[in-house]
Amino acid sequence: MQKEAAVVEDLVDPRRSEPEFILTERAMLEAWLEFHRTTLELKTEGLSDLQRKSRPVASSRLSLHGLVRHMAEVERRVLAGEDIGFLWADPSVDDSELVPLDDADWEADLAAWHAECRASRDVAATKDIESTGLRRGRPCSLRWVYNHMIEEYARHNGHADLIRELVDGAVGW
């Protein structure tokens, strides 16, 4: 008989709900982005520091803690532009914000991610959805940025699902 998987209870949480079915384009994009930001945070809750830093897939650098740091870097760089500095990453080393985490402080890193999310919201609030900035030296619309951020979070939330299940057996959407 197969063991029934535990469910991450916190995923049914008043901080997170699917967007309404009928919204303006911008409101829909912002709602889905918030949904995915909250999903990542919920996936990290109720774990020890060691569990959040755990890399249960031997061939991967991914951990829940590392994903939060990675998304802080993404929040920081995608809306702000290329001339802003890094929090943890070394630009000469791909995904260097993911490891090592030995001395990483969860509360400080979570606070940094929250601050980057706030900063992204603040920057986006000053722009029209058609506004363009530069990404890799080319014009890029806020619409593209929203879609990219949703894609980035959704992809990494899939990773977080698997990591969480491997760390403590909890599953959930």
Image (cartoon, rainbow, N blue to C red):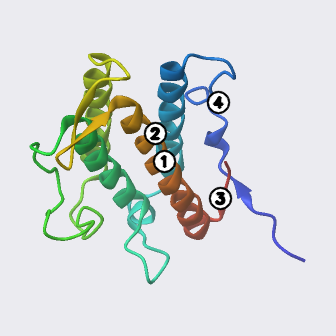
Give the mark nearer the N terminus: 1 vs 4: 4
Instruction: Report the Cα–Cα distance between label 1 and label 3.
Output: 23 Å
For label 3, the residue is: 170
For label 4, the residue is: 18
Q: Position of residue 108 (x, y in %)?
A: 24, 45
For label 1, the residue is: 151
Q: Residue at x 38, y 65 (%)?
A: 53
Instruction: Report the Cα–Cα distance between label 1 and label 4.
Output: 16 Å
Q: Nearer the viewer, residue 88 or 30?
A: 30
The answer to whether residue 68 is visible is yes
Give the mark nearer the N terminus: 3 vs 4: 4
* Secondary structure category for the residue under label 4: loop
Q: Residue at x 58, y 30 (%)?
A: 16
Instruction: Report the Cα–Cα distance between label 2 and label 4.
Output: 16 Å
Give the mark nearer the N terminus: 2 vs 4: 4
For label 2, the residue is: 147
Quadrant of res 127: top left
Give the amino acid at mark 3.
Ala
- Crowding near pointer 3: few (<14 within 10 Å), some, many (20+)? some
* Secondary structure category for the residue under label 3: strand
Is residue 158 placed above or below 23 in the rendered structure?
Answer: below
- Crowding near pointer 2: few (<14 within 10 Å), some, many (20+)? some
Say whether marks 2 and 1 touch (CB < 8 Å).
Answer: yes
Q: Position of residue 75 (x, y in %)?
A: 30, 41
Which dot, 1 or 4, sits closer to the camera? 1
